[in-house]
Amino acid sequence: MANVKSSDGLQSQKSKSGKGNASLVSSIAPFACIFMGYLIWRFLIGNPDNFSKPDLNGGFWPNHETPKSGFAKMYLGGIIVPILIGCFLTVLTFVVERFIAVIKAAGSNNISDFIRKVQFHLANKDVEKAIAECDIQKGAVGRVMKNGLHKYKEMINTTDLTTEQKVLNIQKEVEEATALVLPFLEKNLVFLSTIASVATLLGLLGTVLGMIRSFSALGDSGGGEAAQKLSQGISEALYNTALGIGTSAIAIITYNIFTTRIDAITYGIDESGFTLTQSFTANYK
């Protein structure tokens, strides 16, 4: 028993360490992505070679004019552009992070097939083989099922409790294991849902600021030159809207994909708990 507790303590420490590292990454990643967005906007899109009239004085926001390509025109969208690029990079970062996490949580085999195998072994009263299936499956469902099976095995050898009490103990063990797993599955999805809403608003804000600049330039000019500046200003301002809507669309689509996958895993966890309690009730009345 001492060795088992020591192993559990080590696993708990590793789990806490992993959660701490994940939280650190979650805290740093958005700011790092926005900073990277500024670098892309300032030095890649805003490269002086991309403009016929570059501002060689440099600085935080050089006043480049006459872009040579549509890509360079994005620079003239203003200071909201690097924030939107940062939002897009943040979405990509957490899409990759959640994809890896959900793949691991799903386990190595089909969840329904795994549960059927466990049911078969439990029907034959072979708990050890059922636990071995959990070691093969891994993932969130495998971990919850394994915790429940250890309690299941313990309750078989317990004589001072009624069947109902034993079932409640198994159910409680499954619920506790589930409470530890679910936050990990849903972690960082808040970034995708938030950016899905905020990116569109930021795009509109950038467009409005660009329109303000355009109409200000219109008031300072006259004739055909004014119309030309107005059309250019509107075109540049709409880059903000395009970036905001595009980023928001990607965030919404990936958020829905991940929530669907997580719902399937959660259903598998619920089915695991039901399998254990029903099997114990049927086999050990």
Image (cartoon, rainbow, N blue to C red):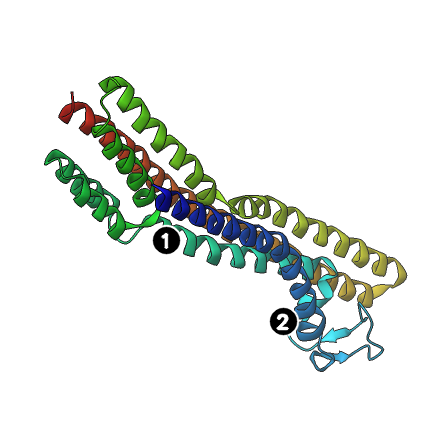
Q: Residue at position x 21%, y 40% from top?
A: 115
Horizontal side of residue 132 vs 227, given as left or right? left
Vertical comparison of 125 with 60: above or below:
above
Residue that sits furthest to the left in the current view = 124
Vertical comparison of 266 with 52: above or below:
above
Quarter that holds the N terminus: top left
Horizontal side of residue 183 vs 156, given as left or right? right
Mark nearest the camera among 2 and 1 is 1
Q: Residue at position x 62%, y 50% from top?
A: 199
Q: Nearer the viewer, residue 91 or 11?
A: 11
Residue at the disc numbered 2: 71
Residue 39's disc is none
Residue that sits furthest to the right in the current view = 220
Image spot of residue 130 (x, y percent): 19, 42
Quarter of the image for residue 128 reads: top left
Residue 239 visible to an observer of this rendering: no
Q: Secondary structure at mark 1?
A: helix
Residue 195 visible to an observer of this rendering: yes
Image spot of residue 53 (x, y percent): 79, 79
Image spot of residue 223 (x, y percent): 84, 64
CA distance for labels 2 and 1: 38 Å
Q: Secondary structure at mark 2?
A: helix
Amino acid marked by disc 2: Phe
Residue 104's disc is 1
Label 1 packing within 10 angstroms: few (<14), some (14-19), many (20+): some
Amino acid marked by disc 1: Lys
